[in-house]
Image (spheres, helix red, strand yellow):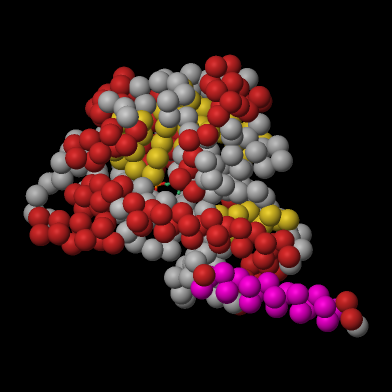
Amino acid sequence: MTTEPRGWVAELPAYRPGRRASTGAGSLASNEVGRTSPMAAAAVALASAALHRYPDPLASALRGRLATLHGTPEDRILVGAGTDELMSLLAAAYVAGGGSIVCADPGYWGHRHAASAVGAKVLRVPCRDHRHDLEAMARIPADIAFICNPHNPTGTVVGREALERFIRGRAARLVVVDEAYIDFADRPHELTALGLDDDVVVLRTMSKFFGLAALRVGYMVGPPNVVDVLNRLRTPFSVNHLAQVAAVAALDDVDHQAAVRAGLRANRAASTQLFEAAGFEVVDSQANFVLVLTDDETGLLDRLSSAGVRVRPGTDLGVPGSVRVTIPDDDGLRLIERAIAGGHAVARAEGGS
Ligand SMILES: *Cc1c(COP(=O)(O)O)cnc(C)c1O
């Protein structure tokens, strides 16, 4: 007897991870922040004495904390092992076996993968000027519309009014807004879909701004009936105990959040200036990365790499002719400066000869 996977599974491409550099400062491929919350680390150390117990399957303490944070009832909140798990649950519940999603192209791998993994169709609407084409997306009657705000890989945003217009006018059944990068935006409250429409699902991760990528924890805020459906579908212990306590601590660690925010704003401006001064076009970003446009993607990757900096090739992200650079800390900024300044010297030497 042979066992064959379902046809759509046989065709799935494997995830291609971003490459790490030899230093933390130069590892700029995966949009991580540069530091761990001290309060989260302390909470994990304390909780590590109780590893013999199953985690709370309801993540009660974390959901309570999130309900307070967002001023919303707990029955509108579901915690997942990363938002990736929540995307998979949404896909399993609402698009498996012949359903469809609509999303932007380029867009986040996780949205497409969740749908493809359950045999759903993925309808991709090309971005215009690196932004979601909401008018075109609104016309597509998919089961789920994924909006990513700020967008990955471009860093561009959809304003609240445009989002509201999309939600009112869209042909898709369920709208899911992925706000993985919203805390890096200058004015998150002017962008968020939270409070806009109770039927929309909002995804928030603890991996990026809150710095818990290693622990795999994220959450959704959405209609109680969707939360209830996913809750019945999920495995009860997917969100481990260390992740739960670390998430509560990271939400409480306002000093760490302020430090991350301040460093990010300064270095997002500084990185943009560095690349622009070296003659590159940089897409205006509200996330913790910038998309740098270039005629010579391989050349720029090589220059960065020889200075010890690893970034994401645009080709891997569906944007050939670009690289996506996570906003670095000060050490990382100097590495980029060295790589780009090297390029300057070459340009001058050529110009002078
Ligand atoms: C990084 C990222 C996430 C986070 O996924 P987790 O599974 O929560 O780590 C979600 N959405 C987008 C668009 C991202 O870039």
Give the residue displayed 31% in from the left and 19% down from the top.
225
**Foreground: 96 or 263?**
263
Instruction: Find the residue positioned furthest to the right.
Output: 353
Q: Main secondary structure of the magenta part?
A: helix
- Percent position (x, y) of residue 1? 31, 42
Give the residue displayed 57% in from the left and 57% down from the top.
268
> Residue 299 vs residue 180: left or right?
right
Which image quadrant for residue 305? bottom right
Which image quadrant for residue 230? top left
Give the residue displayed 67% in from the left and 62% down from the top.
273
Residue 220 in view in this figure: yes
**Foreground: 10 or 254?**
254
As displayed, is residue 317 above or below residue 72?
A: below
Give the residue displayed 70% in from the left and 69% down from the top.
299
Where does the C terminus fall, quadrant-wise?
Answer: bottom right
Q: What range of the chain is rendered magenta?
A: 331-350
> Residue 279 vs residue 84: left or right?
right
Q: Is residue 306 magenta?
A: no
- Percent position (x, y) of residue 202? 42, 32
As displayed, is residue 75 above or below residue 295?
A: above
- Percent position (x, y) of residue 103? 56, 33
Q: How many marks?
A: 0
Residue 109 in view in this figure: no
Which image quadrant for residue 199? top left
Q: Does the magenta stretch include residue 338?
A: yes
